[in-house]
């Protein structure tokens, strides 16, 4: 679905810079409490700055399928990223049936390595299949333990254990890696973990939600070389 995603873009100029750097996916954040959250009007302006060949991804946590579909229609998004908790009583839960309810949209599902590895993610994916649709990509991010608020489920700079990820059995879909990635470590992260794609937000910023053009260029170049693109 993508190779290099720049997430949490809040400004049309930053979107253009990310595309010029070579990113093939842009993430637009709709998660309550995130410093990168946009409303529909601001998101529409960012989407309008992104060419058709670049994937435009809406990032959500705990939103209803109806609300996600409405924002997709209003802003022109291509795909949805479910970044909430897998299960539990927390508000920011994206249940397995959400995939089927998203009416054929491409879905990226954020997952997190726990003490038992991907066991919770495997249960979620199996249930999504039983409900009629599964995600196209699993995005491995850091943090996000039980009770974590929606706005702290991503973009924190916390890093995934790459070696532990490499030891995990496949989830049956391509893996993308997020969490603490920047120009200085993305090539090693790809080499150690063996993932097919990478995603960064805070690692290419000069302030929360404001991207740094040079960092984006360096990140994309290092990632594409390490991915053999």
Image (cartoon, rainbow, N blue to C red):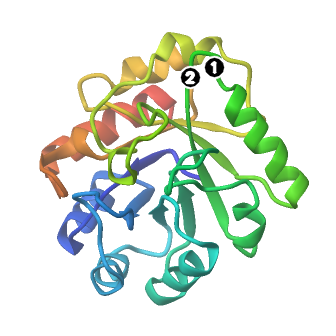
Task: Say which residue label 1 marks.
Answer: 117
- In this picture, residue 141 sits left or right of residue 69: left
Task: Say which residue label 2 marks.
Answer: 114
193 vs 129, nearest the viewer: 129
151 vs 200, nearest the viewer: 151
Query: x%, y% of residue 213?
Result: 15, 51
Say if residue 189 shows up in the picture: yes
Q: Is residue 144 above or below residue 214?
A: above
Other residues around mark 1 within 10 Å, as few (<14) / some (14–19) / many (≥20): some
Query: x%, y% of residue 157?
Result: 27, 34
Name which residue lies at 57% across and 54% down: 93
Query: x%, y% of residue 142?
Result: 42, 31
| Mark 1 to mark 2 CA distance (whole Å) | 5 Å
The secondary structure type at the circle numbered 2 is loop
Q: Residue furthest front?
A: 89
The answer to whether the residues at label 1 and label 2 have Cβ atoms under 8 Å apart is: yes
Name which residue lies at 42% across and 50% down: 5
């Amino acid at each position: 679905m993508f190779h290099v995603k720049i997430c949490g873009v809040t400004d049309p100029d930053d979107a253009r810079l990310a595309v010029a750097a070579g990113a093939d996916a842009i993430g637009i954040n709709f998660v309550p409490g995130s410093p990168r959250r946009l409303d529909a009007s601001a998101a529409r302006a960012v989407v309008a700055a992104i060419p058709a060949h670049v994937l435009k991804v809406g990032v959500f946590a705990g939103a209803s399928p109806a609300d996600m579909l409405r924002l997709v229609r209003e802003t022109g998004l291509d795909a949805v990223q479910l970044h909430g908790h897998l299960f539990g009583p927390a508000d920011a839960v994206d249940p397995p049936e959400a995939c089927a309810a998203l009416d054929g949209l491409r879905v990226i599902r954020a997952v997190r390595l726990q003490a038992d590895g991907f066991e919770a993610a495997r249960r979620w994916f199996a249930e999504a299949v039983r409900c009629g649709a599964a995600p196209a990509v699993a995005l491995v991010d850091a943090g996000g333990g039980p009770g974590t608020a929606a706005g702290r489920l991503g973009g924190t700079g916390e890093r995934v254990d790459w070696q532990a990820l490499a030891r995990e059995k496949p989830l049956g879909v391509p893996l993308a890696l997020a969490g603490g990635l920047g120009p200085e470590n993305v090539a090693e992260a790809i080499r150690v973990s063996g993932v097919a794609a990478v995603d960064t937000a805070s690692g290419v910023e000069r302030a929360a939600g404001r991207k740094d053009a040079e960092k984006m260029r360096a990140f994309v170049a290092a990632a594409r070389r390490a991915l053999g693109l």
